[in-house]
Image: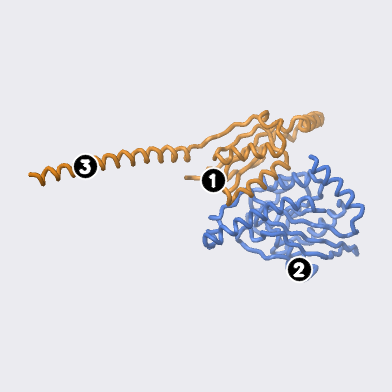
């Protein structure tokens, strides 16, 4: 009889333990699921040109890298200057191997250039470009771990996302 | 902007005091575009020796390779070049890509690290070139940001450029697409490996030198 009681207690204890364990693992699973879903979520950050218009090259690159390192894809209104693009590549290279999982970036710009533009329009556009930067364009920048490939032709940009 | 003005001034001053005929000729482009193959061909044609090693695995050139005193002659005119072969520029490097070529994880990681350093070096060397050959693999889409960024940076530095569409001996080659992508540049199609059209390349190279 006494043995039976003990057994029952043990069983009860075991059940409780199991229940606790179940509770813990379900909590862990929920946590993992949420982080996994976070990891699988695709976030696109739309950045108006005004957000970087008054920044210098270093600050622009820093801002962009900050967003890319959060695994977000940036769609930037406008275009970076060529020296900023080079700086962005340099910066990415410095981070590869130092930031876990970071393998660089994918970047493509689509310019609003039009071959049929008149001479006057071209001059006006170039002056505007010097004064306020090239806003008549769109730039897509994403982490290489999320964006597998960006293919571009003169009129479109296509993003091929990496499968998780 | 200040850097560009400084480089421009440096170019003018170095142009005044530069030893006549000594041209620093850089080879730029994406990995596996054929930069080393062309540099080797020039070096073989005029010196009888290679400049660097070539491989199907991307990022074989991970350090700047230099061959000095390469004298080219055409129509009685001699020009001395310093050939500067640069590591291929890329925006992404994943060590796992090297493992597909049979490298072990550690070796692949080391190669990736060296490749990133090489790209940083390539970008830094842009300032030191007198003229640049931008190699484009004519079998792939030329509208890559790497090509656009390299050409844009060279234009900003006022460095004369010759675009070379390589691998014209391959079926997938599309030189028209390369010309369409960069209409403002002189484009010459060659096969650095097979030597196709290499004479036209030398002719364009001599024309390029006149702009230095």
Dot 3: element: helix
Chain designation of label 3: A
Q: What is the number of the mark on residue A145?
A: 1
The residue to which callout 2 is attached is B44
Dot 2: element: helix
The residue to which callout 3 is attached is A13
Q: Residues within 10 Å of mark 2 (few under 14, many from 20)?
A: some
Of mark 1 and mark 3, the one earlier in the sequence is: 3
Residue found farthest to the bottom: B48
- Circles 3, 2 touching at the beta carbon (< 8 Å): no
Can you give x and y, in whole percent of width and height, for residue B40 in the image?
Answer: 73, 65
Q: CA distance from mark 1 to mark 2?
A: 41 Å
Which part of the image, by quadrant, shows the N terminus of chain B? top right
Chain designation of label 2: B
Please identify the quarter of the rendering in which residue B111 is found: bottom right
Identify the residue shown where x is 72% and y is 33%: A134
According to the colouring, which chain is blue? B
Residue A111 visible somewhere in the drawing:
yes
Can you give x and y, in whole percent of width and height, for residue A23 in the image?
Answer: 31, 38
Left or right for B124, reference A68: right
Question: Residue A152, relative to residue B27: is it above or below?
Answer: above
Q: Nearer the viewer, mark 3 or mark 2?
A: 3
Picture colour for chain A: orange
């Amino acid at each position: 009889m006494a043995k039976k009681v003990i057994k029952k207690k043990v069983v009860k204890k075991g059940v409780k333990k199991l229940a606790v364990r179940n509770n813990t693992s379900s909590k862990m699973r929920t946590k993992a699921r949420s982080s996994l879903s976070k990891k699988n979520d695709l976030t696109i950050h739309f950045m108006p040109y005004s957000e970087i218009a008054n920044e210098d090259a270093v600050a622009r690159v820093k801002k962009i890298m900050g967003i890319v390192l959060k695994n977000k894809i940036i769609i930037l209104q406008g275009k970076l200057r060529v020296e900023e693009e080079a700086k962005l590549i340099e910066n990415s290279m410095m981070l590869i191997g130092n930031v876990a999982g970071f393998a660089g970036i994918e970047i493509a710009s689509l310019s609003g250039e039009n071959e049929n533009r008149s001479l006057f329009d071209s001059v006006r556009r170039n002056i505007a470009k010097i004064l306020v930067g090239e806003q008549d364009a769109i730039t897509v920048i994403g982490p290489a771990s999320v964006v597998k490939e960006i293919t571009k032709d003169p009129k479109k940009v296509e993003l091929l996302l990496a499968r998780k | 902007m200040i850097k560009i003005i400084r480089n421009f001034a440096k170019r003018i001053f170095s142009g005044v005091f530069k030893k006549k005929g000594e041209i620093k000729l850089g080879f730029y482009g994406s990995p596996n575009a054929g930069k080393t193959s062309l540099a080797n061909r020039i070096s073989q044609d005029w010196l009888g020796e290679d400049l660097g090693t070539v491989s199907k695995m991307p990022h074989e050139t991970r350090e700047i390779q230099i061959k000095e005193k390469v004298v080219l002659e055409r129509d009685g005119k001699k020009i001395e070049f310093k050939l500067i072969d640069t590591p291929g520029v890329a925006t992404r490097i994943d060590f796992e890509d090297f493992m597909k070529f049979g490298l072990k994880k550690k070796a692949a990681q080391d190669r990736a690290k060296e490749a990133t350093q090489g790209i940083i070096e390539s970008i830094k060397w842009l300032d030191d070139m007198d003229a640049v050959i931008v190699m484009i693999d004519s079998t792939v889409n030329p509208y890559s940001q790497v090509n656009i960024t390299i050409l844009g940076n060279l234009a900003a530095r006022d460095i004369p450029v010759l675009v070379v569409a390589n691998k014209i001996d391959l079926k997938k080659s599309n030189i028209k697409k390369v010309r369409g992508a960069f209409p403002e540049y002189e484009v010459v199609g060659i096969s650095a490996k097979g030597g196709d059209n290499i004479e036209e390349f030398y002719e364009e190279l001599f024309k390029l030198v006149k702009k230095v």
